[in-house]
Image (spheres, rainbow, N blue to C red):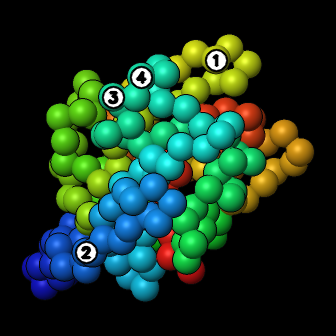
Amino acid sequence: MKKSIFNTLIIIITLNICSAQTTGSFKDKRDGRVYKTVKIGEQVWMAENLAYKTAKGSWAYDNNEEYVKTYGRLYNWETAKNVCPDGWHLPSNVEWDILTNYLGGNDVAGNKLKAKSGLWKSEYLYNIYPCGFDALPGGCRYDFSGNFYDLGYYAYFWTSSPANGKNACRRYIFSNFESVNCFYYLSSTGYSVRCIKN
């Protein structure tokens, strides 16, 4: 009986680990855009996707600027590595691991990173316990075709961690699952960027 109560308390604590995060904001001096921020554990993250428009290597989903207001821009990896504002940087795979481990591990962190929003399309109902990261399913752009895919289903984020000359690590969250996954893919693909504070 005591063990059952103890396990229940652990579950409750794990589910509510995001309830007291510190939030804030900062202004990107390059274009004046203001971004929400959130402190999760000892890390401070942008709580929105980066939307800074570069001369090359960035796109609005479906080449429609209206999507930028909600989802930010998509960047290829070379651009993503250098696009964060001063005082911020593209997180490494290790920094993502620190984040997901704080939230209970890769198997469950996805539902804590998702925004509680009707923008996620899913066949299944999962409980979402938002921690302020507010991930949205902004989809991607495949460079070899120039087509855009997965809006509403996947949130993809570049990390700064390379695999080889053509691939780099992306983190992704799928609408139908709780997990946060790492997969190495073509660095020419367009994915979202979340910056972490230096």
Which residue occupies 21% across, 67% down?
Answer: 15
Q: Which residue is mark 1?
A: 146
Farthest-out residue, right? 165
In-front residue for pair 56/151:
56
Side of 155 relative to 39 (left or right):
right
- Mark 1 or 3 closer to N-term? 3
Residue 160: which quarter of the image? bottom right
- In the image, which disc is placed on residue 66? 3
- Mark 1 or 4 closer to N-term? 4
- Mark 2 or 1 closer to N-term? 2
Residue 184's x, y, as percent?
71, 43
The amino acid type of the residue labelled 2 equals Thr
Measure the C-alpha gap from mark 1 to mark 3: 18 Å
Q: Which residue is mark 2?
A: 23
**Placement of 55 over or under 41, stated as above or below:** above
In-front residue for pair 182/83:
83
Which is in the foreground here, disc 2 or disc 3?
A: 3
Which residue occupies 89% across, 45% down?
Answer: 165
Q: Which residue is mark 4?
A: 64
Residue 82's x, y, as percent?
68, 58
In-front residue for pair 81/33:
33
**The N terminus appears in which quarter of the rendering?**
bottom left
Q: Residues within 10 Å of mark 3 (few under 14, many from 20)?
A: few
